[in-house]
Image (tube, helix red, strand yellow):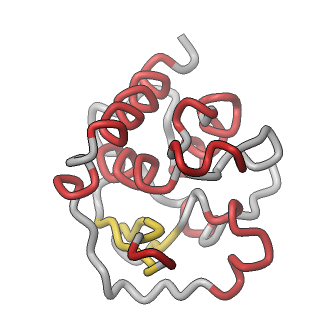
Amino acid sequence: MEYKFYGWEAASSVKPLEGAPAWLKSAADLYDALSDGLWRVETCAPRLRHLWSLENKTCGQCSITAFLVQDLFGGEVYGIPREGGTFHCYNVIGNARFDLTSEQFGEEAKTLVYDDKYPQKREIHFAKAEKKERYEVLKALVEGYGT
């Protein structure tokens, strides 16, 4: 598969933590599974569902994906400030910095600044019940993938 997400080269070398699904060998494998139908309109942020499509699967999936990556691979979740006071989330694991959902921004993705200035906490993100529920759905889909 040809990867277009930010940091794809680094993501290919990131190995999962103990206890991850057996099929998962790298963060790139997770991207492959998510692209293979695990990212869905139901897992998209409600405010962005009108923009979600099979051609734009990563739309509205950033925080739940980034925290799932953290669960499976470790590391930290950081945010890029967006209009309206929200943050676009990405992962830093060791020396690897990558954003599995950067493609949702199209050409704008080239201007995103990954400077690790804004650590993100799941407690804050998951204080929104709908976000926690979307995360749980995505997590269950990943755990059941390939079985």
In the displayed structure, would residue 134 be above or below residue 82? Answer: above
Residue, far left: 123
Q: Up-down: is 13 above or below 133?
A: below
Q: Quadrant of residue 8?
A: bottom right
Q: Nearer the viewer, residue 92 or 39?
A: 39
Left or right of residue 121, residue 33 in this image: right
Who's the residue at 29% across and 66% down the image? 76
Q: Residue at x 29, y 45 (%)?
A: 71
Residue ranking furthest to the top: 147
Give the image quarter of residue 37: top right
Q: Is 51 displayed left or right of 130 in the figure?
A: right
Toward the viewer: 142 or 119? 119
Residue drawn where x is 20% and y is 48% of the image: 127
Q: Position of residue 13 (x, y in %)?
A: 53, 60
Q: Is residue 43 left or right of residue 124?
A: right
Q: Residue drawn at (75%, 58%), measured in percent from left and top?
A: 3
Q: 39 above or below 68?
A: above
Q: Nearer the viewer, residue 81 or 117?
A: 81
Toward the viewer: 80 or 68? 80
Side (left or right) of 51 relative to 7:
right
Q: Position of residue 126 (x, y in %)?
A: 25, 47
How many numbered discs?
Answer: 0
- Tell me if residue 117 comes above or below residue 79 in the rendering: below
